[in-house]
Image: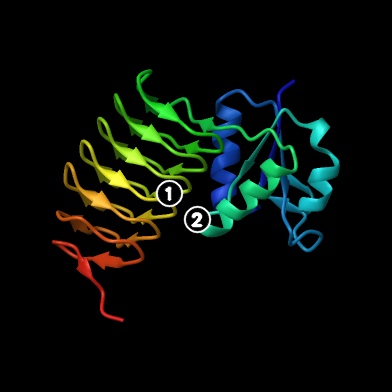
């Protein structure tokens, strides 16, 4: 029996759990630091908080963090890895991943996501429903590509950046670290670190 612990009992966590069951995990249980106020997440039980999980690591064959906030997910995954957790990547069977692409640990790929040849995906990346990552893209650690977003060939995305739902990124474009790309944006030029851009074409939002 394959047993999975998911950290983060949210709506995103339910999608991760569903993808895990679809991809062959037999037992899925949640851990969340809001426990005991949160006892369940949909059909799945919340067994305890992070400290409880760390005391039960031998009970599980894998651990994945299901927290949408990139910085929080990064911090939680790194602390779990340092404590000896066996971080795993969850790929829904309806996702398509080239055998010539690479995926880091702790990633989640939902139904309809496509990763093409030569793409390199860092640790803890979320590739959400029906997003596409074309050839030779490079995504840093803890990036989130939202539903229906599309990265053309040879796009680079820095760590902890968020590509909004339905956004499109032109080929050979570089997006820096900790960037937020608004939903439906069209990114046609490089974006420096720590900016929020939106619109068609995408422009920085005034502070």
Q: How many marks?
A: 2
Query: Closer to the camera, 19 or 70?
Result: 70
* x 30%, y 27%: residue: 116
Q: Is residue 69 visible?
A: no
Q: In the picture, residue 136 is in which quadrant? A: top left
Viewed as shown, does residue 116 lie left or right of 50? Answer: left
Report the Cα–Cα distance between label 1 and label 2. 7 Å
- Read off the residue under disc 2: 70
Earlier in the chain: of badge 1 and badge 2, it is 2
* x 25%, y 42%: residue: 155
Q: Is residue 62 above or below residue 128?
A: above
Task: Please provide percent x and percent y for residue 134.
Answer: 25, 33
Position of the C terminus by quadrant: bottom left
Q: In the picture, residue 105 is in which quadrant? A: top right
Which residue, as the protein is rendered here, is positioned at the far top? 99
Task: Please provide percent x and percent y for residue 43.
Answer: 68, 43
- Read off the residue under disc 1: 143
Viewed as shown, does residue 72 lie left or right of 3? Answer: left
């Amino acid at each position: 029996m394959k047993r999975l612990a998911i950290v983060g009992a949210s709506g995103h966590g339910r999608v991760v759990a569903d993808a895990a069951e679809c991809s062959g995990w037999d037992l899925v249980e949640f851990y969340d630091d809001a426990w005991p106020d949160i006892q369940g997440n949909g059909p799945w039980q919340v067994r305890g908080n992070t400290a409880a999980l760390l005391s039960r690591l031998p009970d599980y064959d894998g651990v994945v963090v299901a927290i949408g906030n990139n910085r929080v997910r990064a911090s939680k995954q790194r602390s779990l890895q340092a404590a000896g957790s066996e971080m795993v990547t969850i790929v829904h069977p309806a996702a398509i991943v080239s055998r010539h692409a690479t995926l880091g640990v702790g990633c989640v790929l939902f139904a309809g996501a496509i990763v093409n040849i030569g793409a390199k995906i860092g640790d803890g990346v979320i590739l959400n429903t029906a997003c596409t990552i074309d050839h030779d893209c490079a995504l840093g650690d803890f990036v989130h590509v939202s539903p229906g977003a599309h990265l053309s060939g040879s796009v680079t995305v820095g760590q902890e950046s968020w590509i909004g739902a339905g956004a499109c990124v032109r080929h050979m474009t570089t997006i820096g670290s900790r960037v937020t790309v608004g939903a439906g944006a069209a990114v046609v030029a490089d974006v420096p670190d720590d900016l929020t851009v939106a619109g068609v074409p995408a422009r920085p939002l005034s502070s």
